[in-house]
Image (cartoon, rainbow, N blue to C red):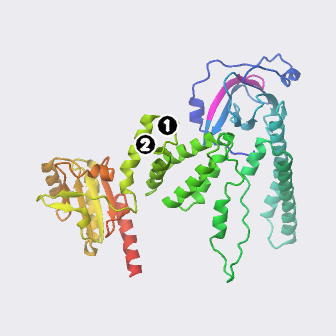
Amino acid sequence: MLFTIYFNEKIIFARIKIQIMKILNFIVSLCCFANIVTAQNYSIFGKVDGMSDGEVLLGYYYGDKQYVKDTVKSHHGFFHFESEENLESGVYFILLPEKQHFQIILDETRNFSFETDVNDLVGSMDVKGSVENQLFYKYQKFTQQKSIEANPIKKALKSVKKASKKHKKLSKELESINKEVTEFKLDYIKNHPSTFFVKLLKAMEPVYIPEPSKDKNGEIDEEFQYNYFMSHYWDHVDLSDDRMIRTPIFHNIMQKYLDEHTLQIPDSINKSLDTLINKARASQELFKYIINWSTHHYESSKIMGQDAVFVHLVFTYFVTRQTPWIDEVQLTNIINKAMRISPNLIGSKAPYIRIPDDKGIQQDLHKVDATFTALFFYDPDCGHCKEETPKVKEIIASYADKGVKVYAVCTEFDEEMWKKFIQEQEIEDWINVIDLENTSNFRGKYNVMGAPRLFLLDAKKKIIAKQIDSKLLGEILENEFKLLESNN
């Protein structure tokens, strides 16, 4: 089929069954069945020869998820979806009792019928009352038939030598089939420009990159192809059409743009997101989805440093009140979280803290003379902290002669427990501090919502890693010292 669906059966079959189930009047003749007239918002009759009796689901796409819209019982292959509820336009799927599925397009036509066979859902499909779906299946039937013709040729190609006459003959046959499919698609796009299905075909068109031109010195711009590709990536996708969000293709196109084609550094991701969001402003549904998805995606990302993308999104779109669908309580929570994260982003100067040690001497973090400083927040009564501290100690000891130091902050206010922890862990050579007066605001400055929390700072107290464990600390230090040695 044209699109691939991934069903989360637990989600689909765990949903509460719709209270009023509709059953076809099976006495109605197929002639009447094909020419129904109804006052409902949608009325879709289906007949699938050879299908078992059971539940048939009508589902829809929203971004990268699938949801159930309606559920009916089938009898002798017949079923009927109908309701006065609104049905948004887009690509829908019908899931049969045998877990087979096929797709339909919902446009302004809400009342139509179809008949097919369970053994060949696409090839046997006969749609009445919906021009969009007739065109949709005409295209699928052609491409399915060409795929059937191509498969044995592809198989045969694997069993012959590449330089042989047989291989050349088979390659030419396959090339001819591919050309037929391409020409058929182009004709389809040309002859049916107003259909939603053609919009989807266009959206899946690759970006064709021209050869880079040479400057007056005969040099080629090495970045031309990438820059051209990125600047024309969305040319074929109608980002003003709300229906795009209810298809199985938009999210995949977007995610490839952000995850595969965009350099995975915050500045580049921010630039790509801003470009996409601004292009999608004409569609309220796409604009809302892109912001919601990307905010959640980068807020919860496991990739260190991508929280900077979350902060950028919040300050650019949430703080400026461009997200009216977010209620005030949720908006406040999102902004507050971004405010906690923003002072301690990777690449920024570590927030200033000055906390007394066990002798009452104020220890200024920024004045610690070290090649690298491990900023370690811990709770003396935390089991995980007790496990992680010896591991951090071992890593730091291996780099002690290279000027690596630890600025260790006790997150609690029990001085006796703090001193006991230092003795038991044998970390007296660390810079151990405790803020008994709670005046430094280290929790707010470093977003310390739990313990342990480990940051790594360079000699200028720039944050180069955050919220890492002892293992990653060792790996980062090893790489950093290699870089230092290679630059000297």
Residue shown at 78%/46% (left/top)? 198
Residue 437 appears left or right of 266: left
Q: Which residue is mark 1?
A: 326
Residue 467 showing in the rendered view: no
Amino acid identity at mark 2: Ile
Q: Amino acid at mark 1?
A: Ile
Membership of 79 in magenta stretch: yes
Q: Position of residue 136 (x, y in %)?
A: 80, 41
Q: Nearer the viewer, residue 154 or 200?
A: 200
Task: Give yes or no for contact between labels 1 and 2 (Cβ–Cβ under 8 Å).
Answer: yes
Q: Is residue 392 above or below residue 217?
A: above
Height in image: 483 above or below 419?
A: below
- Viewer-nearest residue: 150 or 71: 71
- Indicate the secondary structure of the residue bearing disc 2: helix
Compared across the picture, whether 103 is left or right of 12 comes to right
Looking at the picture, how far across and down is residue 200, in whole percent?
A: 74, 46
The image shows residue 34 at horizontal and vertical percentages of 85, 25
Left or right relative to 388: residue 276 = right
Magenta range: 67-82
